[in-house]
Amino acid sequence: MKNYVIAALSGAALILSSQVVAADIEAGKSKAVEVCASCHGADGNSPVPNFPKIGGQYRTYLEKVLQDYKSGSRKDPIMAGMAASLSAADIENLAFYYSSQSGSLNSNK
């Protein structure tokens, strides 16, 4: 029985760790430059007060917000349009990229 528990916990750990590694930071950076940088800045630290600073924001928060804009459960006409064309992989990659940047919530760099 003990071996089954260890095997189950090991399998769960592998699944969770693969979800973190699955994101592609370079793809997120490319998509950020292509779609997001004009408002939020290339590193997520917009110099314009009208646009939120998203650099260093929590990855899970960024994913949730983008998914909510895409689904329409969070309302903003500009962000809804931007999120509409994002795939699930784009959202994951963008969240991974922006969460790795320096910002007011996170000073990784």
Image: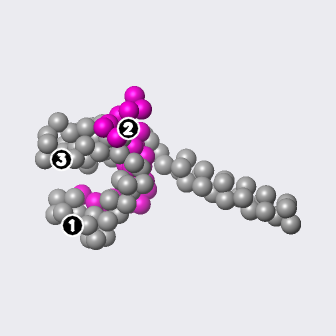
Q: Residue 19 in the image: state x and y as whole percent.
A: 55, 54
Say which of marks 2 and 3 sits in front: 2
For image coordinates 32% across by 36% down, the residue present is 103
Front in this rendered view, residue 54 or 39? 54
Q: What element carries label 1?
A: loop
Question: Does 6 appear above or below 35?
Answer: below
Q: Quadrant of residue 8?
A: bottom right
How far apart marks 3 and 1 lie (CA) works out to 15 Å
Q: Which is more N-terminal, label 1 or label 3? A: 3
Q: Residue 47 in the image: state x and y as whole percent.
A: 17, 36
The residue under label 3 is which amino acid type?
Phe
Q: Residue 28, can we see it?
A: no
The magenta span reads 81-109
Which residue is labeled 2 in the image? Answer: 106
Which residue is labeled 3 in the image? Answer: 51
Q: Is residue 53 shown left or right of residue 105?
A: left
Q: Which is more N-terminal, label 3 or label 2? A: 3
Q: Is residue 86 shown left or right of residue 14?
A: left
Q: In which quarter of the image is the C terminus?
A: top left
Neighbour tally class for label 2: few under 14, some 14-19, many 20 plus, Cα within 10 Å: some
The residue under label 1 is which amino acid type?
Lys
Tell me, for residue 75, which label it has, or none: 1
For image coordinates 39% across by 48% down, the residue present is 58
The residue under label 2 is which amino acid type?
Asn
How far apart marks 1 and 2 lie (CA) works out to 26 Å
